[in-house]
Amino acid sequence: MSRELETRSQEKRATATLTASDEYVALPTDLREVREVKLNTTPITVLSYHSPVALDQKFSSGGTGKPLGFSIVGDELKLRPVPDSSYTAEIIYIGTVSALSDSNATNNILSRSPDAYLYGSLAEAYAYLLDEQRAAQYMQRFTMALEEIKVDEQRAHYGTGSLQISSIYARQNAAVES
């Protein structure tokens, strides 16, 4: 489920202290996808993502300064220009679904959609027992449960209101009238 879903409970924030002359900083261990990296400066500086090669090409001087771009190299964030002093970076990211264990008996998905865990478990159990028909039946239900979670998350992010599009002509007429 962690590979398939991007739920609100997976959206997280982490801070990292950037050190002068160190272009790398460790990423959160549960990171799946970076949404945004920004420096908590005044005003806030939002860093732009570049591939590792593009980052080196854009900031080829190798100088120091306030970081403006980042890339991901392994489990680290690579910053350019190289920080010239200490900064606090905020990383907004999608993490993994919290795993269930003896010390963590629930997570947001189990609380809100227990059927997803039930159907996924049954699909795996019947696959193990070599009952392909029942495995396929529960895999279909598991897939449907995941799709319902995705729709629920989309509604939570964007609401259920209708999309409003105004024509360029209506906006031009409104501008002329005012």
Image (cartoon, grey):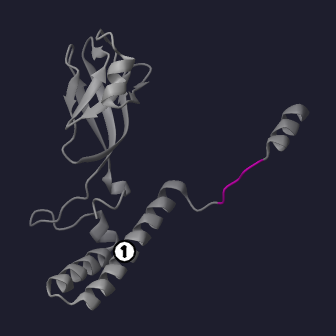
- Relative placement, left or right, of 172 versus 72 is right
Residue 172 in percent (x, y) is at: 84, 36
Label 1: state its secondary structure.
Answer: helix
Compared with 62, 52 (above or below) is below
Residue depicted at 29% across the width and 59% down the height:
3
Residue 137 position by quadrant: bottom left
Residue 130 in percent (x, y) is at: 17, 87
Q: 81 or 110, which lies in front?
A: 81
Residue 97 position by quadrant: bottom left
Residue 46 in percent (x, y) is at: 42, 27
Residue that mark 1 sits on = 143
- Label 1 CA crowd tier, 10 Å (few <14, some 14–19, many 20+): some
Examine the residues drawn in magenta and state their main secondary structure: loop
Compared with 149, 158 (above or below) is above
Residue depicted at 37% across the width and 55% down the height:
8
Is residue 73 in view? yes
Q: Which residues are magenta?
A: 162-166
Exactly how many numbered labels are in the figure?
A: 1
Residue depicted at 85% across the width and 38% down the height:
174
Q: Quadrant of the N terminus?
A: bottom left
Residue 158 in percent (x, y) is at: 53, 55
Residue 88 position by quadrant: top left
- Relative placement, left or right, of 157 versus 136 is right
Compared with 77, 169 (above or below) is below
In the rendered image, the residue lying farthest to the right is 177
Q: What's under tag 1, amino acid-wise?
A: Thr
Compared with 57, 1 (above or below) is below
